[in-house]
Amino acid sequence: MSSRTADIDFTFARELTVRTTVGALAVTGWALEQPLSYMVNDDGLYDWQSTTRAHMQDVLVVLDAPAHANHHVAVCVYHDGANTGGQLLFSPGRMACSFIPTINRRCLPDAVDFTDLSWYMHTLVPPLLTVGLTSYEACDIGH
């Protein structure tokens, strides 16, 4: 059995914040995962942290801090109604981010080894258009 990697890379017309992105996604049912998982890659280690949603505002301040503008930052998001989620990874400069379905990855009904990328795009693209989405690229690669 092979493993798979899937992701959707988004490009934006302007810089965006984690707060703005998470707010836009909330319209279609996405929210920060509980417990809240996040990462600031300021040392090359991609060291994930975890806290409660009660600290959500503090975490968003850290992720959007000017001191981290040139670092990768990430947060896990979850769609409660669909029982799925993943990592939202923001690139330095905040003109691009990627979504990696890592929590209960949705599969195609007739091809369960493949990720149902169309479902993810259907729920992610419309709200991201409101914050300046200009393009996306999706892939599902077997190893």
Image: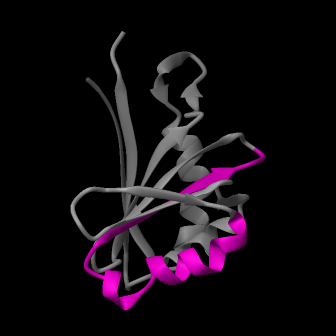
Q: Is residue 26 magenta?
A: no
How is this picture coloured?
Answer: one colour
The residue sitting at 36% across, 90% down in the picture is 66
In magenta, the rendered stretch is 53-81
**Quadrant of the rendered image containing residue 71:** bottom left
Query: On screen, 54 above or below 89?
Result: below
> Which image quarter is the C terminus in?
top left
> Which image quarter is the N terminus in?
top left
From where the camera sits, is residue 42 visible?
yes
Left or right, 131 with reference to 47: right
Residue 134: % across, % down: 39, 72
The residue sitting at 39% across, 46% down in the picture is 7
Residue 5: % across, % down: 35, 34
From where the camera sits, is residue 132 visible?
no
**Quadrant of the rendered image containing residue 93:** bottom left
The residue sitting at 54% across, 73% down in the picture is 21
Left or right, 140 with reference to 33: left
Give the camera-side residue of 141 and 44: 44
**Quadrant of the rendered image containing residue 124:** bottom right
Give the camera-side residue of 11 and 38: 38
Q: Is residue 54 magenta?
A: yes
Residue 102: % across, % down: 49, 40
Furthest residue toward left: 44
Residue 116: % across, % down: 53, 34
Left or right, 77 with reference to 140: right
Q: How many marks?
A: 0
The residue sitting at 70% across, 65% down in the picture is 53
Give the camera-side residue of 74 and 10: 74
